[in-house]
Amino acid sequence: MKVLTSVTLSKVFRRLTSSAFIAVLSPALIGLSLNGCAQQSLSTHVYTSDTGGNAKHPTLIEKQPVSSTKQFTVGAERYSKYLPLLAGKRVSLVVNQSALVSSHSLPSSTVEPEERESSNSLATQKNKIKTSQRNQHLLDALLQRSVNVVSIMSPEHGFRGDKGAGEKVDSNIDAKTGIPIHSLYGATKKPTPDMLDGIDVIVFDIQDVGVRFYTYLSTLHYVLEAAFARNIDVIVLDRPNPNGSYVDGPVLQSEFSSFIGMHPIPVLHGMTLGELAQMIVGEQWLDIDASSYDNAKLTVVPVQDYQLTAHYSLPVAPSPNLPNDLSIRLYPTLCFFEGTDVSIGRGTDFPFQLIGHPFVEFGKTKIPVNANSAAPHPKHENTLLSAHVFSYVDPTIFEGSDSKQTTHKRSPISGLDIATLIDAYSRFSEYNKVISASDASEETFFTRPDFFDKLAGTDALRYQIQAGKTPAEIRQSWQKELSKFRDKRKAYLLYEDTD
C-alpha cells in the first residue's frame, strides 16, 4: 500500500510537539449565519442567522482561557511539504470557508513558517499572533503560487459555508476565479466520475470539530473512496481538533451507519481529520476492492507545533451554527437533543449554547424562537423557550417591559455529558406527572428516536436513559469497545498520544 503517512511516518510526527502549546487565535469570525446539528435530513448542523438584522450573536471566545502564545502552523501553510506534489498536476480542492491561511506568507517567500527562527520575547510572540491571523483562502494562495486548480468540491454548507442545515448545495461557478464548484452535499455526496475527469490530485482542507457525527468526516471518506478507485492521489492538509482532548462515547455499530456516522469510532474520537484519513485507509474501511488501495497515495501534512490537549480557538466558524468556542465545546452533548423535543437554540441568538422548551422548564430565561434564512422551520417556532443558557452568555430576558441582562455563572459542560441528557429526560417525566391530573397533553422527549440512535451509533444509549441508568452505568457500558478503539488508533496518530 502506498500510503505515505502510515505507521512509520506516524511515529515520526507524533513526537514533534512534545513541548508545544497552541496559541489562541483571534476570533475573526467571518460574516456568516452561525451553525451546528441536523434539521430534517441526516445533517449534523443546525442553523440560526439574524432575525430581521437585529439579532446579537455573542462573541464568547474572548472569555475563554488562553493556553499559550506559542504559534502553530496548519498543514495548508506548510507549502514546502506539498507544493512539489502539485507541480504540473491538475488539482481539485475539497474546501469551504474554513480553508484559511495567513496572507503574510507571500508567494515569493522561500522560508516556511516552521523554518523561521523563533524569539523568546513575549512582545515578539504577541506580534506573531497578531500578524498571523488567517485571512486568505487556500484557493487564492495556491493560485498565487501558480498551482493549476481546475475545480472545487464543496461539502455541507457549501463553498462559502452559508447554507442551512440539510439544505441542498448546488454546483456552481466561483464568481471570483471562474473555477467550477461541484457540490458534495445533497443528492451527490460522493465525487462522481464526471467530477474527477481530468484530475490528477485532490487536496482536502476543511476544519473539523472532533465529533463523529459532524459530516465533514463522511465527506472525507467519500473523497478517499472515489479517488482511490480512480487512481487519484489525495493530500489532506491537517487542522487542529478543538475537542481533541476527549475520547468518549459509544463506538458506532454497523447497523446504525449513516452519513452522520460511517465508521466504528466513538462519538468523541480525539483525532484530527488527517489522522482519521490514515485510519480509514489503513483499516480498509473504503468500499473498494482491496487491490484499489494501491492505486493512489494518501499524503497527510500535519500541523506543526500542535498538541491535541491544548486549547484551540477556531479563527472562523466551521459551520453556520457553531459561532464560538462555547458552542463547539457543547456540541458533542447538545447535538443529541436534535433527536428530542428539546431546543438547542436553532432560530435564537444562542445556537448550541442553550437547552430549552416552551412548557418543560430548563431555566428562567425566556428566549424567543423565530424562523430565519438559516432555520426556516426551527423547532418550537414562534414560542418562548424556558431555557438554560450556558456560561459566558448574557442573554436578554425578552418577557415583560423591563428587559434586563443576566449572567449564568455555572461552568459549561464539556466532552460528552450524559448527566445533561438524563436530567432533560427526567424533566419531561416530572412535567408529565404533574399535568397528568389536569388532562393536559403530555410532552414526548424522544421525538426522533431513529435519528437519536444514528447520532449515538447505537440504540443502547436511548434505552439506558429510558431505563433510568446512571451516568456512571452508561459510561461503563462502552468502556470495553472504547479501549479497543484507543489501541487501534495508536498506529495512526500524528501527534502526542495523551492516553
Image (spheres, helix red, strand yellow):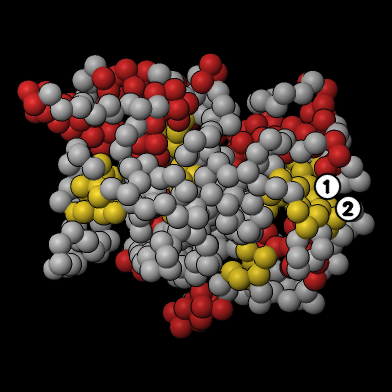
- Residue drawn where x is 39% and y is 36% of the image: 338
Could one spot residue 119 in this view of the protein?
no
487 up-or-down from 80: above or below = above
What residue is shown with label 1?
Answer: 201
Q: In the displayed structure, would residue 24 be above or below residue 90?
A: below
Distance (Cα) linking label 1 and label 2: 7 Å
- What is the three-letter code of the residue carrying label 1? Val
* Label located before the other in sequence (1 or 2): 2
Left or right of 164? Residue 423 is left
Where is residue 473? Give x, y as percent: 26, 22
Q: Nearer the viewer, residue 495 or 215?
A: 215
Amino acid found under the numbered disc labelled 2:
Arg
Q: Which residue is mark 2?
A: 90
The relative height of residue 315 versus residue 415 in the rendered view (above or below) is: below
Query: Residue drawn at (55%, 59%), measured in percent from left and top?
Result: 305
Mark 2 burial class by Cα count in 10 Å: few <14, some 14-19, many 20+: some
Left or right: 297 in relation to 36? right
Residue placed at 24% from the left, 29% from the top?
443
